[in-house]
Image (cartoon, grey):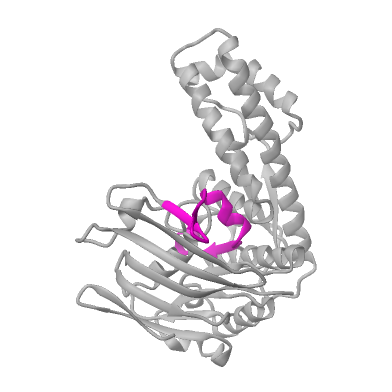
Amino acid sequence: MSALYLSSLVLSHFRSHRQARLVLDGRPVALHGPNGAGKTNILEAVSLLSPGRGLRRASAEEIARKPEGLGWKIRAEVAGSLTHDLETGAEAAQPRTLRIDGKSAPQTRLARILRMVWLVPSQDRLWIEGAEGRRRFFDRMTMSFTPDHAEAVLAYDKAMRERNRLLKDMVRDAHWYDAVEAQMADNASKIIANRRATLDRIASAQANAETVFPTADLSLDEAEGGETLVAPNDFAAAFAQFRSRDMAAGRTLIGPHRSDIAAVYGAKGVPAPQCSTGEQKALLISLVLANARALREDTGTAPLVLLDEVAAHLDAARRAALFDEICALDTQAWMTGTGPELFSELGARAQHIAVTEENGESMVHGP
């Protein structure tokens, strides 16, 4: 199997980093430093080398270093079985752009170059907060297996916004709905099929793994997401049937945008929301690792794994087990922690980089 990794990462006016350059060799990267030093900002920069708004879901304007407000830029070299030069950023008050090997490209192209999974502290409440976060988490997982999933989700959302506009305007002529509902139905069918395939793939990856982390049995909640529907014609008929109800609500009330993801702690048979905080975290780690293992089996290359402050929530034994699993994956994992002692079990298996803050500017000390 061939590893794919970032061999260099350069940040310019990115959040707290005025300038930063990291030269990397493919080993896991352990970033350590005090809170507020700028460690997570580096992980966010890496996450923006995948489609979407990154692990913080920030706007281009939010990312630019203050007070300069000059815009920002990320450059990275991808090495391994494939090589690419990636550059993304935004000029002041302008939308984000992307160049791949010197040529402008849509963000969706990134999913075919770098596959990426991540876990950040804001996801610790994933199982007990709203369904939107769980859908986003699972759709990123789905996109890692099926890059075209991103296009299906974007196309569905665009068509749904148009249908919702018609509903709010109380348009009753069916001809106005036919084309937009056909687009929604076609993409809804693709989204559900992709999600089902991901459920099966994750279940297989967990069942065949030796890991200290608990198995999470996942399922799609079929209450309002339309998972019982399969073909585009089924969705088209449902959208037409519920127009009056949706018009009263002013929005579309059935479809994959309403789906929820349920998880059960497999060994105990306990739903994730009823598990302890530590068990909920362990279930998330288990899913991220299963996602990475499955991608490595399917594509021959492990994805980049981003783990923000994950070591602080694990005891020494489980932390060591996590590091062993990461190294066995042959992946360039990016991890953050407040002190180097949190990564002592990694030793020379990782690149250790200190991040400090000096006079309001993040400084990188390492490769």
Q: Is residue 276 among what the camera can see?
A: no
Q: Residue furthest bottom?
A: 348
Judged from this view, the residue extending furthest toward the front is 102
In the image, is 202 to the left or to the right of 133? right
Name the side, left or right, on which 271 lies relative to 28. Answer: right
Q: Residue at x 23, y 61 (%)?
A: 66
Say which of 225 and 268 sits in front.
Answer: 225
Quadrant where the N terminus is found in the figure: bottom right
Residue 117 colored in magenta in the image: yes
Q: How many marks?
A: 0
In the picture provided, is 103 more to the left or to the right than 62? right
Point out residue 357 in the picture as x, y percentages from the top left corner: 27, 78
The relative height of residue 67 versus residue 366 in the rendered view (above or below) is above
- Residue 208, given in percent of the width and then of the height, sits at 80, 68
Compared with 193, 56 (above or below) is: below
Q: Is residue 352 above or below residue 266?
A: below
Quadrant, the C terminus: bottom left
**Picture residue at 33% right of the left edge, 79% below the top:** 34
**Does residue 205 appear anywhere in the picture?**
yes
Which is nearer the eye, 11 or 335? 11
341 part of magenta stretch: no
Q: Residue at x 53, y 58 (%)?
A: 50
Front residue (pair 278, 285) = 285
Left or right: where does residue 39 sit relative to residue 27? left
Q: Position of residue 44 (x, y in %)?
A: 43, 64
Write the residue at 47% across / 86% down: 352
Q: Which residues are magenta?
A: 97-123
Give x and y (percent) for residue 251. Answer: 50, 24
